[in-house]
Amino acid sequence: MLWLIIEALDKAGLLPTKLRDWLLLREGLLQRFGRKAVDIVRAEGWREKIIAETASRLVVEDAAWRGDYGKLIGADPFARGIEMKSRINPMLGRRVKVLLGAETGTQFAVPQPSIFASSSRLIEPKRAAA
């Protein structure tokens, strides 16, 4: 819903270019993060720490994603105490949770270095019996 409002504001010329570019970058990162998590689960099976694993793989394997994430937060991806990370990282986790139809489990500390200090375990969705 929010994205529809943003698109309407942009089309009406009411969204400053810098803000529009930042919002597009954020949405692109969220989409790529979610796709990576889904791809991992499809190829390798379910894992409860998929959010943290996706982050670890992207920052190591995908220099473009890592660079875009750094631009989005305005800092090095591994930096601590970055206010923007406390807003963006939960969005990354929620995107994965929604795409996988999972429920949130317990939190855990993520081994460092990582863009996350902590993450949530996800509970695998129950599938209807065929």
Image (tube, rainbow, N blue to C red):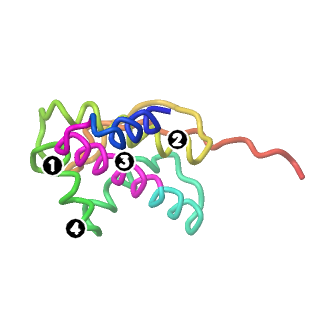
- Mark toward the start of the polypeptide (4 vs 3): 3
- Up the image or down, 36 lies above or below 103; here it is below
For mark 1, what is the residue?
A: 78
Mark 1 to mark 3 CA distance (whole Å) = 20 Å
Who's the residue at 82% across and 45% down the image?
A: 128
What amino acid type is highlighted by mark number 3? Answer: Glu
Q: CA distance from mark 2 to mark 3?
A: 16 Å
Q: Main secondary structure of the magenta part?
A: helix
- Magenta stretch in the rendered image: 15-34
Compared to residue 66, the image places residue 94 above or below, namely above
Q: Which mark is residue 27?
A: 3
**How crowded is the residue under tag 1: few (<14 C-alpha within 10 Å), some, or many (20+)?**
some
Residue 97: mark in rendering? 2
Q: Nearer the viewer, residue 70 or 43?
A: 70
Q: Earlier in the sequence, mark 1 or mark 4?
A: 4
**Quadrant of the rendered image containing residue 9:** top left
Q: Which mark identifies residue 63? A: 4
Q: CA distance from mark 4 to mark 3?
A: 18 Å
Q: Nearer the viewer, mark 1 or mark 3?
A: 3
Circle 4 SS class: helix
